[in-house]
Image: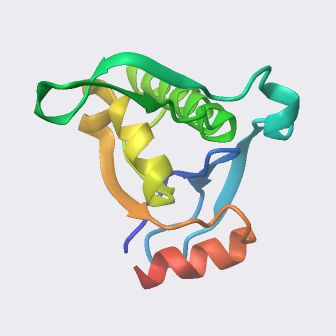
Amino acid sequence: MELPHDTAIVIADGRKLLFLRNAGDARYPDLRLELKRDAGENPPTHEQATDLAGRAMGTRVAGGQWGSGTIEPADYHQIAEDRFAAEAAAMLNAGALAGEFERLVVVAPPETLGELRRHYDRHLTERLASEIAKDLTRHTIPEIEKLLLAE
């Protein structure tokens, strides 16, 4: 993948975001970290939940019959990761609207990428050059440069 000079690159997952910019050229990228955000602590479910999931009585089931069923417990970790992705997309939308970047590459795991996409506005999609469904948040910047060039 070519990363022309001044291309913005976002490396994200549900807990961490790196905003990089190419200070080099397309052939020899030199990614510089401009912003790092961390979602902070995400305590265990037993510290976040106050009660267990229950059962629903008097609900319609398949075939229109009345019955009962269980209610799936909330996944508080996934809720926190989705919230972080929505906040990241809002930040990117604001940056696109303000003209902070002309070309953007987003790299995130498939689940996070899907959540980010749900919140893109038209200003951001106009500047979106590429999306890559990979988790690179634990890689160093030189490793990210090599992996992006290989795409």
Residue 139 in the image: x percent, y percent?
72, 71
Whether residue 94 can be seen here: no
Whether residue 92 can be seen here: yes
Residue 4 in the image: x percent, y percent?
41, 62
Q: Quadrant of residue 138?
A: bottom right
Q: Is residue 78 left or right of residue 95?
A: right
Query: Residue placed farthest to the left in the image?
Result: 63
Q: Quadrant of residue 64?
A: top left
Nearer-the-camera pick, 49 or 131: 49
Residue at image coords 33%, 57%: 130
Residue at image coords 46%, 52%: 111
Q: Is residue 116 left or right of residue 145?
A: left
Q: Is residue 130 left or right of residue 39?
A: left
**In what quadrant of the picture does the N terminus appear?**
bottom left
Residue at image coords 84%, 41%: 44
Query: Residue placed farthest to the top in the image?
Result: 58
Residue 104 in the image: x percent, y percent?
41, 47
Nearer-the-camera pick, 64 or 31: 64
